[in-house]
Image: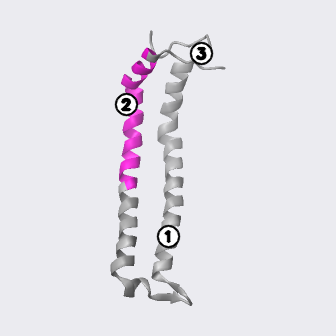
Amino acid sequence: MSISEQDVTGQDPPADRWEQVHQSAEFQQLRSRLRRFVFPMTGLFLLWYLLYVLLADYAHGFMSTKLVGNINVGLVFGLLQFVSTFVITGLYVRYANRKLDPIADKIRDDIEGAAK
């Protein structure tokens, strides 16, 4: 049974079909592309967060430097942690739409059959 056969019964594909999918070139490409984004981005975010924590702990003078009124460097860095989370989310959505979703859609269509 090939991955591209349609399951006309409307039931979940059998377990051996999932095994075939996991070993398929498309699935391997999907995993590779996902890892190519997730691992570096996770590393960058963790480094950025670690920098914030280390500065907060060891650079009190720098972090308490006032920028405007009562707003200091530490507050700005803290808020940038939230901003960076939203930026990473946006980058991931854009990456997934362009690089991951087409492959995932093809795999799903191969498993479930195109319902058109």
Of residue 17 and residue 94, the one placed in the foreground of this image is: 17
Q: What mark, if any, has residue 11 been given in the picture? A: 3
Q: Disc 2 on helix, strand or loop?
A: helix
Q: Does the magenta segment cover residue 73?
A: no
In the rendered structure, which disc, 3 or 2, sits on the residue that comes first in sequence?
A: 3
Please name the amino acid that badge 1 sits on: Leu
* CA neighbours of label 2 inside 10 A, class few (<14), some (14 to 19), many (20+): few
Q: Residue at x 37, y 30 (%)?
A: 28
Which residue is under mark 2? 28
Q: Which residues are magenta?
A: 16-42
C-alpha separation, residue under disc 1 versus residue under disc 3: 47 Å
Q: Residue furthest front?
A: 57
Q: Does the magenta segment cover residue 37?
A: yes
The quarter of the rendered structure image containing the N terminus is top left
Please name the amino acid that badge 3 sits on: Gln
Which residue is under mark 1? 80
Q: How is the image coloured?
A: one colour
